[in-house]
Amino acid sequence: MTTMYERIGGEPVVRELCELFHALVVADDLIGPMFAGSGESHVRNLAKFMGEMFGGPARYTEDRGGVGGLYDAHLRLGITEAQRERFVELLLVAAREAGLPDDAGFRERFARHIEAGSRFSAKFSQPEVAEAPRPAFPPMAPWTWGEDDS
């Protein structure tokens, strides 16, 4: 069975997606300040995360600690709803520019996964979360793409 990672073209396409996205966010007035100075480290970490979520190597889990690393990366950012929405919007633009599959099924599922992930990041970025005990997180699980995926 072909993974989504293989279907989209593997590491080169994931890397291009992340480079395009990073260029869009740093130029954006609303969310650009959150990414100021992150440069190559953001592209590298996002590519590891996206690659793993597409079903590729578990590099984000190995290098950043999986969901716990994602939590740590967003802690104290205070992401607003408008910023979260712009993040999703720009990632979908980058997906088109990177040539990810344009069939409706893929785009709909991709958007749904990005929405869910952005909500996780926004929730755990709020100031009061930093004062609460760190939650226990399950291992990262690649996104699903099957016909019966809901």
Image: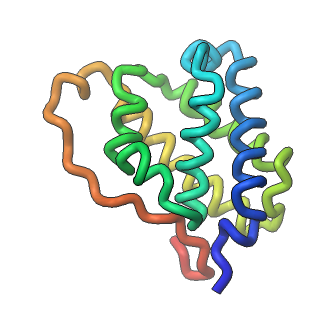
Vertical relation: 82 (above or below) 143: above
Identify the residue at image location x=56%, y=25%.
83
Q: Nearer the viewer, residue 132 or 73?
A: 73
Q: Nearer the viewer, residue 143 or 73?
A: 73
Residue 58 lies left or right of residue 91; in this view the side is left
Identify the residue at image location x=70%, y=56%.
11
* Residue 67 spot, x, y in % from top left: 36, 48
Residue 2 lies left or right of residue 134; in this view the side is right
Identify the residue at image location x=68%, y=61%.
108
* Residue 127 spot, x, y in % from top left: 29, 19
Q: How is the image coloured?
A: rainbow
* Residue 53 spot, x, y in % from top left: 54, 59
Residue 114 lies left or right of residue 94; in this view the side is left
* Quarter of the image that includes the N terminus: bottom right
Vertical relation: 37 (above or below) 107: above
Identify the residue at image location x=64%, y=35%.
43
Q: Residue furthest left?
A: 133
Question: How many labels, in total?
Answer: 0
* Residue 8 spot, x, y in % from top left: 76, 64
